Image: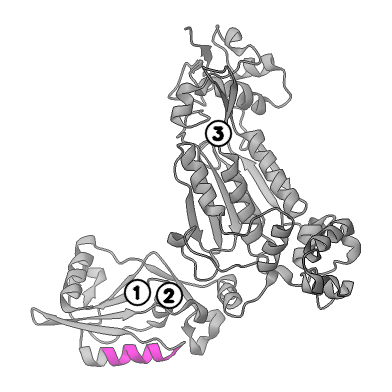
Amino acid sequence: MVEKELRDLIESIRIRGCEGQTIEVKAARQGCPERLYDTISAFSNQNSGGIFVFGLEEKNGFAKVGVYDAQDLERKVMEYCDQMTPIVRPQFTEVDEDGLTFVSAEIPPVDIAERPCFKTAKGRLHGSYIRIGDGDKPMTEYEVYSYEAFRKKYQDDIRPAERVSFQSLDMSKVKTYLERKTCARPNLAGMSEAQQYELTGITRDGKITMAALLLFGLYPQAFYPQLSIIATCVPAEQMGVLDAEGNRFSDTKRIEGTLPDMLEGALTFVRANMRTATRIDKETGERIDIPQYPMDAAREAILNALVHRDYSLHTEGMPIQLVMYSNRIEITNPGGLYGRLTLDQLGNAQPDTRNPVLVTVMETLGETENRYSGIPTIRFAMKNRNLPEPVFADRRSEFVVTLYNGEHGAAGSVGDEDVKQANVQDEKGLLKFCRTPRSRSEIIAYLNIASGQYALRRYLDPLVACGAIRMTLPDKPRSSKQRYVAVEE
């Protein structure tokens, strides 16, 4: 940083009146501030690093107060940095203005292979910090572990699955997998069965691995109940909002089984809980179903969550969360982005792989290509349907994929262009029934389907979405006085 950049930064801080993710302000008017090591650690542990600005007093509206002694301040900051593991090397800049001296100390990011950076005397577990907004928070035990797992190349997908024996596996699936694995590998085919198990990730030191249990287990959740998917359908854009019948969820399910079983179960849940409009081709008369979400995108998002989630001891009690809101799907898996990959590189760079054995077995079974095409597939599928860009978020210890359906609070089902063209098939004669304004309870009784919420979602909502039926109170879609009436042509 040159002097002009420091002056500009000082003015920017004073105008905004706040610090930030990469900026920490200290007065240092009467001496070097104490406890700098937590911020040094936090800055070092984020990819952007961070900057200390000394000479502004936050409590006084970031007034310019200057530092007590630039040379001594820099020496003491260096002493703080020398107390870190690995040692941090800051870069200082000084600027004089109106008889006051201001100092900046740029803290560079530590290479991810050396993270977390921590205060040596407190140890890695208690001396590591992470930056959250303009504050420094102690790293959780899992956050510390996640860096160590990358640094030491732990393979939690082939850690021993406790209490699991071959009697817990579907040996016909194991046999099929080995046949596929050995058919083009004569050296592997010539080995003993025990050697094949070890070299293909089914066992490790003679014990059944997590990968084997998750892919070939008769019932993996008997040993790890939370290695499952909790799927929920929420009748609003946020959790906690009740529908007209007082329900928090219109559908909820725990999806269990092997990874392929859970993938199929999650897709079945999505299909059952999303709306489907129908467009009739004017030239051929052919019926074209238009699902609320492109299933290619949903499949890749769920598959990525299953194969790239963290399977360590720290997260075995955390299920994958699949939540369908009225305007979006959110899929959350334990474990943030792994290794050096950053959000802006998703789909554009070859990532480090958290579970290499698991991914390889899934490739052999034909469940995934293992060609890093998942993110591009999601993006293309959403774009091809004129839906909003998928949103990827790397939060503390978790990764979230959000797919929006193009609706914002309205009971819609597909993108705008598709809604305009939709000619939804009236399978239950609702248009005729709703010539007289009807309440939800009347419509549910008329449809005579056990699940009232499913009945509304399946038969009423698509007609509302395409404009065939209108709400009498469109500004209050969940009102108890809401009525639905067919739109006369």
Give the labeled residue for mark 3.
292
As helix, strand or loop, the secondary structure at mark 1 comes to strand
Mark 3 to mark 2 CA distance (whole Å): 42 Å
Q: Earlier in the sequence, mark 2 or mark 1?
A: 2
Query: Which stretch appears magenta?
Result: 74-85
* Residue 316 visible, this orientation: no
Q: Quadrant of the N terminus?
A: bottom left
Q: Residue at x 50, y 60 (%)?
A: 395
Q: Dot 2: few (<14), some (14–19), or many (≥20) neighbours within 10 Å?
A: many
**What secondary structure is marked by label 2?**
helix
Q: 340 or 432: nearer the eye?
A: 340
In the rendered image of this protein, does residue 126 appear above or below residue 214? below
Dot label at residue 50? 1
Q: Can you give x and y, in whole percent of width and height, for residue 4 in the image?
A: 15, 74
- Amino acid on which disc 2 is placed: Ala
Marking on residue 42: 2
